[in-house]
Image (cartoon, rainbow, N blue to C red):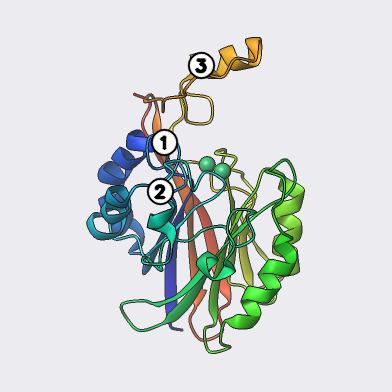
């Protein structure tokens, strides 16, 4: 069995999230020795968006192979970063403000020469208006990936559990690993679905959990009490790194192992 180990981390929230990498990535490498490193970076730059400096930090310093994003991809208003010069920085292929679905997937090789594809999609339920159908987008992109690329991974960025599960179910025979992102709350339902696809409804965030979805509690609570929205800052307390480890047979693309991981500190 030629096994490939995949690490996938949920939404990385600002500098507290990036500090989690510094703190725990060496331990993860020791514990799991992943071949493929994936992270959702939509909140990496102070809670919203991405900068080139942070992207290079994630890929060069920490060794992430592909960075996916979500509805906050344009948070730092620098679309030039996303116009394809970094093919391993993905946008949600079917988002209303992403006109070229090619920016939503890439094909890469592991150090040992195994090809894999990563696809980034976004939901429509309780998300921005105008996102295109993720089910259609998934099929269209999967049809563009050569059969020889047997490892296919989807980051399905969405709010609603049912939509994420339905999307995963619709691709279960064509995909090795499908995980949800965006809610910033890890779900406990990781499993192998259809005897082939590793699945979890949400990876959870890598950031501060003494927070409201990673951001300062006070500003968020005030918004719910008064309706006034302030600039949110990432919170700092209780940093956790959350995601999954999945193992896939490189020959068939079948996932045979998936486990949630959480490296956490209560200070
Ligand atoms: Fe997020
Ligand atoms: Fe999001």
Q: Residue furthest left?
A: 61
Q: Nearer the viewer, residue 19 or 70?
A: 70
The residue that mark 3 highlights is 219
User: Which label sits in the foreground, 1 or 2?
Assistant: 2
Disc 1 or 2, which lies upstream in sequence? 2
Figure check: 249 above or below 160: below
Q: CA distance from mark 3 to mark 2?
A: 26 Å
- The residues tagged by marks 1 and 2 sit, at their Cα atoms, a distance apart of 23 Å
Is 4 placed above or below 193 here?
A: below
* Left or right: 92 in relation to 25: right
Measured as percent of width and height from the top left, residue 8 is found at 46, 57
**Mark 3 residue element:** helix
Q: Residues within 10 Å of mark 1 (few under 14, many from 20)?
A: many
For mark 1, what is the residue? 207
Q: Quadrant of residue 267?
A: top left
Whether residue 131 sits left or right of residue 22 in the image: it is right
The crowding category of the residue bearing disc 2, from other C-alpha atoms within 10 Å (few below 14, some 14 to 19, many at least 20), is: some
For label 2, the residue is 78
Residue at horizontal 33%, vertical 64%?
33
């Amino acid at each position: 069995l030629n096994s490939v180990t995949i690490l996938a981390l949920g939404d990385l929230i600002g500098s507290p999230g990036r500090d989690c990498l510094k703190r725990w990535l060496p331990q993860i490498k020791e514990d799991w020795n992943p071949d493929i490193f994936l992270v959702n970076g939509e909140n990496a730059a102070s809670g919203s968006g991405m900068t080139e400096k942070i992207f290079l930090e994630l890929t060069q310093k920490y060794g992430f192979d592909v960075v996916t994003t979500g509805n906050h991809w344009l948070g730092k208003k620098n679309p030039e970063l996303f116009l394809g010069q970094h093919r391993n920085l993905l946008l949600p292929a079917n988002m209303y403000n992403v006109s070229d679905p090619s920016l939503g997937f890439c094909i890469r090789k592991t150090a040992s020469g195994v090809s894999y594809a990563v696809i980034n999609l976004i939901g429509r339920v309780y998300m921005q208006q105008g996102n295109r159908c993720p089910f259609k987008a998934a099929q269209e992109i999967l049809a563009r990936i050569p059969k020889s690329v047997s490892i296919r991974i989807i980051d399905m960025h969405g709010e609603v559990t049912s939509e994420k599960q339905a999307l995963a179910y619709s691709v279960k025979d064509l995909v090795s690993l499908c995980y949800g992102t965006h809610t910033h709350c890890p779900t406990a339902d990781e499993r192998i679905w259809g005897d082939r696809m590793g699945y979890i409804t949400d990876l959870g965030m890598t950031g501060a959990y003494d927070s409201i979805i990673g951001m300062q509690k006070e500003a968020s609570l005030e918004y719910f009490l008064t309706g006034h929205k302030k600039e949110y800052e990432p919170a700092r307390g209780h940093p956790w790194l959350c995601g999954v480890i999945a193992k896939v047979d490189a020959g068939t693309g079948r996932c045979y192992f998936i486990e949630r991981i959480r490296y956490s500190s209560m200070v």
